[in-house]
Amino acid sequence: MIYKVSDNIISSLGFTSSENYSSVKKYKSGLSFYENMFDIPEPFVGSLLENEKINEAFSKIATKSDIEYTKLEKTAILSVYDAVSEANIDPADNSVLFIFSTTKGNIELLENNNKYEPERVYLWRSAQLIAEFFDNKNEAVVVSNACISGVAAQITAARYLNAGRYKYIIVIGAEVLSKFIISGFQSFKALSVEMCKPFDKNRTGLNLGEAAATIIYSKAEQETDLHSGTIIYENGAVCNDANHISGPSRTAEGLFNAINIAMNGIDKETVSFINAHGTATPYNDDMESVAIGRHEMNDTPVNSLKPYFGHTLGAAGILETIISAYALQEGIILKSMGFEDLGVVSAVNINKDIIGSDKKRFLKLISGFGGSNAAIIMRKI
């Protein structure tokens, strides 16, 4: 069975998973209002990492390299560094594989002349540099499938471990924002100038965020080999319906099928909560509610973490899995902040406050451009 060994989150709410989780429990958001950022005339609400804090933290970790790393690479390396330290493993060992999840990578390097080599804009190069920082000689794997990348990367990790090819998989998701990303979402009229309100009838769009998140997975032969409270990856699926370049299926066919596969043989009554993608855009939230309703899970508590971190793109699936795992371990269901009145086509149970639960599973949903969808089910021993 695949289990979570360690993790780390770096976001505007903190540089450790525990800091981030503690802030979420206190209903603290990392979102801020920005004007004239990235030379963009329209304001937006988002979650940005401070360059000074990243550089200060990065200067404190040992490196034999004289490479000048980008903000994306520094943030990713910092996240991996702490997760590896917690796991007490050797990241240079041949039994360790790095999987890098990102939607855009260093795409901002295309915007102007810079000091980096031309190859630096490619996703494979960032993944290679991150692995090489830790002296890992295996060819790093890149997963870049729009917003589902972080969950798809975890599914990929589980497949490698089940195949017996590696002992540990380091799954890292990282994203930083730029003029290209912000202006792109603004061109869709998708960004909100206030904190997002997933599933609420007055939602006005999404917020974007910067973050890095790492989960280290391994495989145990027997559940009895693991400690009580350990988080297990049980199953997952990616199902693409190719509905539209940016719009989800109104019948939620892809997400419905992903849930169906991930939940195969699992009693829905054992699911404590559903951590939804919950972007607070009209189409995404409606589609997710339809998928949940088609599975007759309307009474299962649902939350979204986007009002705390923003939509962190390639990091979202990993970051939100970590926070949800902490909640499952503690036996609580987190509040979906910003929600007041239901505004989606299928009546789902959006969680309006922190509540207790003794159930042992959560379902993580995520969807993205191009009709991509993914779902994973996690369980606590």
Image (cartoon, rainbow, N blue to C red):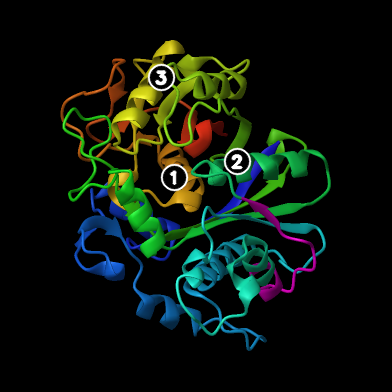
- Region in magenta: 130-143
Say which of 205 and 111 sits in front: 111
Asked whether residue 44 appears in the rendered view, the answer is yes
Q: Residues within 10 Å of mark 2 (few under 14, many from 20)?
A: many
Residue 231: where, in percent of width, then height?
56, 40
Tell me: residue 147, above or below residue 180.
above
Looking at the image, which residue is at 28% across and 15% down?
A: 347
Q: Is residue 37 left or right of residue 147?
A: left
Which amino acid lies under the numbered mark 1 shown in the image of this protein? Glu
Residue 327 falls in image quadrant: top left
Mark 2–mark 3 distance (CA, rounded to whole Å): 22 Å
Sequence-first tag of 1 and 3: 3
Q: CA distance from mark 1 to mark 2?
A: 13 Å
- In what element is the residue under mark 2? helix
Left or right: 202 as drawn, with respect to 123? left
Position of residue 380 measured from the top left corner of the image (x, y, whole percent): 54, 34
Q: Which mark is residue 320?
A: 1
Label 1 packing within 10 angstroms: few (<14), some (14-19), many (20+) = many
* Residue 250, label in figure: 3
